[in-house]
Image (tube, rainbow, N blue to C red):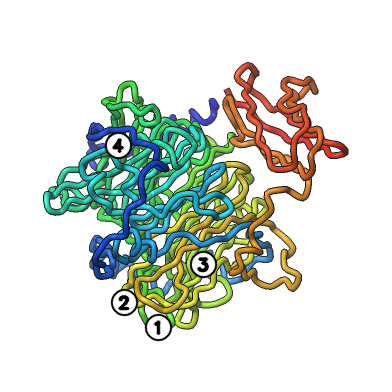
Amino acid sequence: MKKLYTVWSCMLLAALMVPGSLFAQEVEQMQMTRHHTSAPLHSMEMPDTPQGPVAPFAVPNKFIKFGSMKNAAMETLSSEGDDILQTQDGSGYANIRKSFEGANDDDNAAVLGFRVVPPDTEGDVGPKHYVQWINSVAEIFDKRGNTIMGPFPGNYFFQGLGGICEETNNGDPIVLYDEGADRWNVSQFALDFANNNFAMCIAVSTSGDPTGTYNQYELNFGSVFPDYPKLGIWGDSYTLTTRNFNDPTGFNQSAIAMDRQAMLDGDAVVNAVSVRLPRFFFEDGILPMDSDTPGITGPAMFGGHTAFGSSRGDRNQVFRLYAIDVDWADPASASFIILPVLDIPDYNISAAPYVQQPNGQVLDDLETFTMHRAQVRDFGTHRTIVANHTVRAKGDAAGVRWYEFRNYGDGWMIHQAGTYSPKNADDRWMASIAMNGSGDIALGYSVSSSTTYPSIYITGQTSDYSGTGVMNVAETLVQAGGGSQEDASRWGDYSKVSVDPRDDKTFWFTTEYYEETAGFDFKTRIAAFRLSSGGSHLADGGAANINAADQLIASDVPTEFAVEQNYPNPFNPTTMINFAVPEAGHVSVKVYNMLGQEVASLVNEVRDAGNHTVSFDAAGLTAGVYLYVMESGNFSETRRMTLLK
């Protein structure tokens, strides 16, 4: 880990080179204003259907006005090409393993008494569950798509907490599974306009059971409205970003770090630190960097793209990174770090909204927002960030601009980037991106045009194409739309690609679509898939049409022996190893050092057919590379893992 500590030293030195008079930002001390540990979620009574329907409504988005700056940028860039535009489809494929219906606007009507757009489709996957939250309604599924609990009002996560987190149910939800602690982290904002009182509501499960008890917290913002909140996980902090309206200083955005261990422990006093980024930075919708590597070290990171330049006169299009360095034993000493600006290839921008539908109703593209989520991984030799946002690709069509940044120990740099707009001039937008433990990148998004109903698609890049800036996986249909959205331009506001913690290989994606043309009647879909660089999983080599759910639900009993790459890897000191047994029999899983000496026997017994997981605790071993071997009958497979100390 010495090299990675050097990374952060270099970052701090680089930050100190920035003129303090221009960039100095005050780090504000905060504390959670309410705390409670809930009763088990599954013990709460489901609400009766509300009486008296409320008229459907679209939640208005609060855009900051870029004005002449945006117009000038459009004039400058509208005639320029995008040098990294991908117009050809890939030859790899996405193997969709599961696909099932999520919550929908009917659930809003049944549980809340009204219909609303956009859905703010959000969810995450754990070892046994998928937790989805739309608007103000949540639902918990097993990984075969069966409903375990719900749909139920989102503020059920905060029952017993009191205050506006319990009394209101305003949405903008986030769901994260914290692999390092086997906990669920959920949030929404609470809005009391009558009393000009606003807060963030955050709940952390006390176990890996999402239907169990939660440590509940309110983080009060007073009269400041914390719009579009996004959560992240980083080492010893839970992180949060908000777009702040009603602030006496004007529009700004907050980057916040919260004491993760205190929230996991359910402490009544939980410290947080906050930095408000002023308007002159000119990002909108910056994000916390959400780490899929448990225990990642160094200052908690934040960032996003700059669409229209800034008042400092630097180049129009860059990606900015920030960090908060906090020691929770002494939060008053926390500091804010501005990292060197990352130049990104030019792209074209346009006036929102510009996404088309067959019925003529245009949809918001949120091009100024870096889209949820910005994901980080630590591979030991380097760290990665993957992120995306919407741009103008071909003609007036929207496309997805995506990035992979890397840090090998001497600062962040761009490793690859691309603008995805293959085959046709359909709009592609409202995307989410993630990288798995093998280095594969998945991109999920919506596709629409004047002749195509909004539909759900995925693509990706397998690790053997890394550095090319090309999504080599063929664009794959997850769910065909059957109609357009009427009466509202609001779509999204976000979607979510996440990685299954059981194998660190399978991706999960959720977003919205319409079965038929209507107003306020969206559906959502949840799909799990893996990526492969060649061949086709269809006899005719065509696109995957997966509307029939029974074609996608894989058997719980595997068809062949397999042992997965351990997760996390590298690790310190514990890691998980998943293995598959197609028929009952004796199984051994042993660990060896590089001298061939056995250092641990993890499994040495008869196991039933099925998928199994074993934990390996290497606390007593020295750092280095180890081998683990699974054997059963004639099957034998060896894999490597790296222990860090």
Badge 4, how many Cα within 10 Å: few under 14, some, many 20+?
many
Q: CA distance from mark 1 to mark 3?
A: 18 Å
Disc on the earlier residue, 4 or 1: 4
Q: CA distance from mark 4 to mark 2?
A: 37 Å
Labels 4, 1: front one: 4
Which residue is under mark 2? Answer: 487
Disc on the earlier residue, 1 or 3: 1
Q: Secondary structure at mark 2?
A: loop
Query: Which one is in front, 187 or 87?
Result: 187
Residue 211 to residue 513: above or below: above
| Amino acid type, mark 4 | Tyr
Query: Which one is in front, 355 or 81?
Result: 355
Which residue is under mark 4? Answer: 217
| Amino acid type, mark 3 | Ile
Q: Are marks 4 and 2 in contact (CB under 8 Å)?
A: no
Q: CA distance from mark 1 to mark 2?
A: 10 Å
Place of residue 535 in the rendered image (x, y in percent of width and height, measured from the top left): 74, 63
Q: Quadrant of residue 495?
A: bottom left
The answer to whether residue 404 of the structure is visible from this angle is no
Badge 2, how many Cα within 10 Å: few under 14, some, many 20+?
few
Residue 359's tag is 1
Q: CA distance from mark 2 to mark 3?
A: 21 Å
Q: Are marks 1 and 3 in contact (CB under 8 Å)?
A: no
Badge 1, how many Cα within 10 Å: few under 14, some, many 20+?
some
Disc on the earlier residue, 4 or 2: 4
Query: Which one is in front, 154 or 28?
Result: 154
Place of residue 371 in the rendered image (x, y in percent of width and height, measured from the top left): 41, 56
Disc on the earlier residue, 1 or 2: 1
Residue 456's tag is 3
Disc on the earlier residue, 3 or 4: 4
| Amino acid type, mark 2 | Asp
Disc on the earlier residue, 2 or 3: 3
